[in-house]
Amino acid sequence: MVDWPDSLVNDLARRRAIIVIGSGISRHSVGENNVRPPTWRAFLTGAVQDCPDKSALEPVQAAIDTADYLHACECLKTRFDEGWVPYLRKTFSQPAFPPANIHEQVLQLDSRIVFSLNFDDIYERHVSSIHRGSYIIKNHSDPDAAEFLRGNGRYIIKVHGNLNSPDNLIFTQKDYSRARVKHSSFYQAFDAALLTHTFVFLGSGYSDPDVNLLLENQNFGFPSQVPHYFLSSNGFEPDRKTSLRENRNLKVLEYDPIDEFHSGLVEELKSLNEKVEAERFEITKAVSW
């Protein structure tokens, strides 16, 4: 069982936390023909196999093997050419992935702001079906993306874009570099949010270059901050855990995945929801919001 820190429970209860969901959350969905959304590595491995230009693919595979996913993706995008966007939609949209129990658990935490690192819209569709479109969905490329910082609504922020606007997807090294300049106001807002909110990373990796840069800047620019939190299955490397805490102020919380589809994370989020709900009751009773 995860020993949820009291400070994190309190921040969630007071809606001073931002939940960040990655491909590990989407993996809980099961679409047509029993297909699940792929992780980034699995997607790239499959793209190598499906690549229309199969000449000299060894460097691409080598990049995947060394977790240099950005450059591997850039090479594959070039090789697919005009077939790239249809391939993305075939992979992430056409299987018609339905929401899973874990999406409901994330929603029940009732965070005012959720950052999604995913291209799919599984979580957004679930939220819209429950709240009838009352959540505000913004992409990193929207001119008013920073509205989430001071707006009164509840927001879902698509940090890497979505497949409805493929020109603004952030998937390759070039995409990251271009977005950092073209949409710098969004990254300034992201930076401000890291200083004012506690971030909770669910189902995500720790290799996103922009997120890492912002975390490191915050860590060394504002030392002695309370940590952000990164959920991971048991067996996380101790040295890596220490590095994440010292360089990015990320505290790793480990859970028992139970099975290959990490059903254990669902149970942990149920437990967290109970704690947050109890804390909100105490805050209301004490009129201390």
Image (tube, helix red, strand yellow):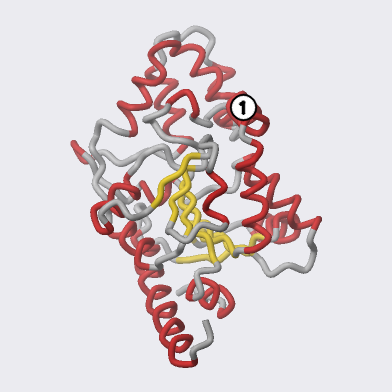
The correct choice, above or below, for 55 with respect to 265 in the image is above
Residue 271: which quarter of the image?
A: bottom left
Task: Point out the residue furthest to the left here.
Answer: 33
Relative image position of residue 275 (x, y in whole percent): 43, 80
Relative image position of residue 135 (x, y in whole percent): 37, 54
What residue is rendered at 52% in x and 14% in y? 57
Q: Secondary structure at mark 1?
A: helix
Mark 1: amino acid: Gln
What residue is rendered at 36% in x and 47% in y? 26
What residue is rendered at 75% in x and 57% in y? 219
Of residues 238 and 7, which is closer to you in this image? 7
Of residues 283 and 256, which is closer to you in this image? 283
How crowded is the residue under tag 1: few (<14 C-alpha within 10 Å), some, or many (20+)? some
What residue is rendered at 28% in x and 59% in y? 101
The mark tally for this picture is: 1
The correct choice, above or below, for 207 with respect to 131 in the image is above
